[in-house]
Image: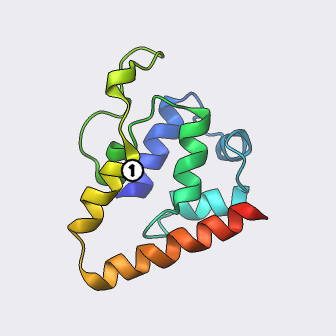
């Protein structure tokens, strides 16, 4: 489950037992972050993923979402440009695999996240 991977990631990033500090570090509320770790949210919002990548650019978001691949893009703290995922193309490929109903759901989620970021 994604909640388990979120916990593993936090612990690997040396925030073991420090949920509140981790939430503050990535600029989200502690209560919101807790819902992700507790599995109360089935699909974490793009905004959360964006905050993670902004603060820890070597996180493999594909691993976080699907559990496939490695936790980090590279073993070192430096990101090799060729290893960075082209998120636009990757999102389009993933969306093409979804049912119409799921596409509509993500369409509205993305719009809501964009509106929220404007404020």
Q: Quadrant of the C terminus?
A: bottom right
Q: Residue furthest right?
A: 119
Image coordinates of residue 35 in percent, x first then y, are 58, 65
Image coordinates of residue 91 in percent, x first then y, are 34, 56
Q: Is 89 or 53 nearer to us in this picture?
A: 89
> Image point 39% across, 81% down: which residue?
104
Q: Residue furthest left?
A: 97
| Residue 15 against residue 77 in the figure, above or below | below
Image coordinates of residue 68 in percent, x first then y, are 24, 44
Left or right for 84, reference 22: left
SS of the residue under disc 1: helix
| Residue 55 against residue 87 in the figure, above or below | above
| Residue 18 against residue 73 in the figure, above or below | below
Name the residue beneath numbered marker 1: 88
> Image point 32% across, 50% down: which residue?
89
Left or right for 72, reference 70: right
Q: Is 50 or 63 nearer to us in this picture?
A: 50
The answer to which quarter of the image holds residue 59 is top left
Residue count near mark 1 (Cα–Cα under 10 Å), binned few <14, some 14–19, many ≥20:
few
| Residue 10 against residue 78 in the figure, above or below | below
Image coordinates of residue 19 in percent, x first then y, are 65, 46
> Image point 34% across, 58% down: which residue?
1
Q: How many marks?
A: 1
Specify the color scheme: rainbow
Left or right for 113, reference 38: right
């Amino acid at each position: 489950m994604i909640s388990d991977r979120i916990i593993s990631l936090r612990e690997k990033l040396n925030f073991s037992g420090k949920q509140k500090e981790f939430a503050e570090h990535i600029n989200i509320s502690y209560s919101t972050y807790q819902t992700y770790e507790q599995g109360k949210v089935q699909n974490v919002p793009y905004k959360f993923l964006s905050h993670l990548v902004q603060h820890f650019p070597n996180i493999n978001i594909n691993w976080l979402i699907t559990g496939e691949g490695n936790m980090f893009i590279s073993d070192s703290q430096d990101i090799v440009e060729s290893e960075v995922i082209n998120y636009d193309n990757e999102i389009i490929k993933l969306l093409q695999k979804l049912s119409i109903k799921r596409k509509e759901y993500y369409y509205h989620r993305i719009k809501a996240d964009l509106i929220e970021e404007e404020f």
